[in-house]
Image (cartoon, helix red, strand yellow):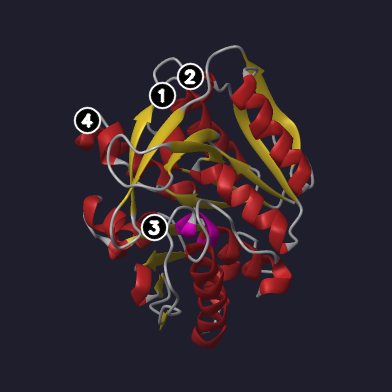
Amino acid sequence: MIVVAGEALIDLVPEGEAGVLAARRPVPGGGPYNTAIALARLGTRTAFCSRVSTDAFGQALLQRLEAEGVGVELVQRGDEPTPLAVATIEATGSAEYGFYVQGTADRLFEYPGRLPADARALSVGTCSLVLDPGATAYAELMRAAAERGVFVALDPNIRPGLIPDAAAYRARFTSWLPHVSLLKLSAEDAQWLGGDIGGWLDAGPAAVVVTRGADGLSVTTRAGRVAAVPGVPVDVVDTIGAGDTANAALLHALAGRGLLRPGALASVTPDTWRSVLAFAARAAALTCTRPGAQPPHADAL
């Protein structure tokens, strides 16, 4: 089982006429939430670990997880409001977000003590690792999982507008790396964090995967191996959830090859990496052909 930890929120996605005052449709979202659903749709047994509001939005978020077959036993509940992300879609289909997260449920996530005994991987990332007190609890979960021998994947999914102190966040990011087996991030994330892939690998991860939008994905490993695949050309509706789907597809493909074990990535050949990356590229491309975060099921791939 893969446990995905982090925020669940509501994306307010524009419909019809563009512009700031365009009508917006509420849809379930959040990087970790999308990753959990993408994993379940691909056929990986998945559990979600978060704090979700008891309000109407929170109920809808939980119901969708259950409908998709994602385990919710690790979900904490609270009467704080659900976080909101207001999306603006650019002409290219890329999405920009404004976040409303003050005093929301995910901010009050508490360290759950331990993961289930059958958890073989933990995926963490996005807004959850930015805002305390919840961010400290998620980081503690990451550290404890790594100490127990669980494979840890980190997708920081940087949202600069949410980060009050960039230098402090970069320092915290560096402190997480000794607990991480796989670091996945976008080219924009990598640039914002300083672009030091070699330094990040020296700090802990066995591999760093960088997504480059239409230009595909690449991986650099601690063993010095490098592989890359091109993007899959599609007619883009929007890019919402594409990076989350790529993250899920990477984990699903690695799990299918028995590689979600600490130390296992050291032996992965460039050919195997290209196969894994190509699968992630196809999954992300299909997500871009659909409005909102709608990752593909396994049969679509």
Mark 2 → mark 4, Cα distance in angstroms: 20 Å
Q: Which residue is mark 3?
A: 185
The reply to whether the magenta stretch includes residue 187 is no
Q: Sort mark 4 into few (<14), some (14-19) or many (20+) by Cα contacts within 10 Å.
A: few
Q: Mark 2, mark 4: which one is toward the viewer?
A: 2
Mark 1 / mark 3, whichever is N-terminal: 1
Q: Are marks 2 and 1 in contact (CB under 8 Å)?
A: yes
CA separation, marks 3 and 2?
26 Å
Image x and y of residue 216, in percent: 39, 75
The three-letter code of the residue at mark 4 reads: Asp
Outermost residue to the bottom: 271
Q: List the residue tagged with mark 1.
A: 101
Q: Earlier in the sequence, mark 3 or mark 2?
A: 2
Return the residue at label 2. 104
Q: What kind of residue is marked 3?
A: Leu
Q: Is 266 situated left or right of 218 in this image?
A: right
First in sequence, mark 4 or 1: give its number: 1
The residue that appears at 71% across and 40% down in the rendered structure is: 65
Work out whether 216 lies above or below 29. below
* Location of residue 258 in the rendering, given as x and y in whole percent from the top left corner: 71, 69
Comes first in the chain, label 4 or label 3: 4
